[in-house]
Amino acid sequence: MTPDPMTQHPLPAHERVVFLKPLISSPTIEVGEYTYYDDPDGATAFEQRNVLYAYGPERLVIGRFCAIASGTRFLMAGAEHPTMGVSTYPFTMFGGAWAERTLDIVTGMPSRGDTVVGNDVWFGYRATVMPGVRIGDGAIIAAGAVVTADVPPYTIVGGNPARPIRRRYDDADVERLRRAAWWDWPVDVITEHVRTIMAGAPADIERIAASLERQQ
């Protein structure tokens, strides 16, 4: 038996763990199946407490099978302040004459774009992701990291600002894993090969993917 990705609490005895997909209601947030958030204090409020300043059209897209630890925050483009002049104070947000005189400044600010997280990404405790960042498949974000720039696939980053610590695999193996895209396999196939997915090598995953292709 495998967990239902649309179950809010996949571990009934542990309400701190939630699958995010059934919890998301915002049209600007998309989360893939089996991605979970772990928080002993209000895990179900992820959309309100962990996705911050989501005032604009920019989207947060998170792939499948991601593991997100307590306190991870995604800062969206609404957090940006104008920096083209002397003051960074957000006069516009308070309305009235201030908004009338400055709205064009705010609406003319360049956007950093969508924040996109790949599949099988692990976020450590209290990681922070800045607006417009793209994080590749299989990356690991260390506890407390502040991610200000794109993270390549299968790379471990940490610190403030986050810097590469090491790559998990070389270019050839990363390409094998991204081609195989095990996270897109049918769940029964994932279940059949779950031990290899957890403990095998990229070449093992590549062989399974090749076998699936021959069966199609």
Image (cartoon, helix red, strand yellow):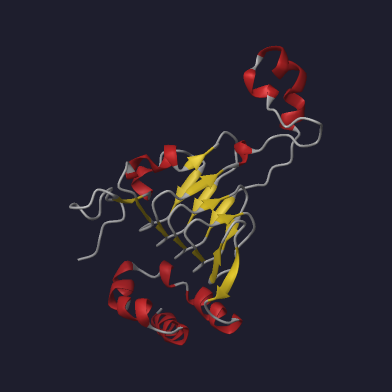
Q: Tell me the residue at 41%/39% (across/down).
A: 25
Image-based side of 96 in relation to 24, left or right: right
Image-based side of 121 in relation to 84, left or right: left
Marks counted in the figure total 0
Q: Position of residue 215 (x, y in %)?
A: 38, 82
Q: Tell me the residue at 24%/64% (across/down).
A: 2
Q: Position of residue 40 (x, y in %)?
A: 30, 47
Q: Is residue 86 above or below residue 66?
A: above
Q: Tell me the residue at 26%/56% (across/down).
A: 4
Image-based side of 37 in relation to 137, left or right: left
For the C terminus, the quadrant is bottom left
Q: Is residue 91 above or below residue 62?
A: above
Q: Tell me the residue at 31%/55% (across/down).
A: 5
Q: Position of residue 100 (x, y in %)?
A: 73, 16
For the N terminus, the quadrant is bottom left
Image-based side of 108 in relation to 44, left or right: right
Q: Is residue 176 above or below residue 113?
A: below
| In-front residue for pair 210/4 | 4
Residue extending farthest to the top is 97
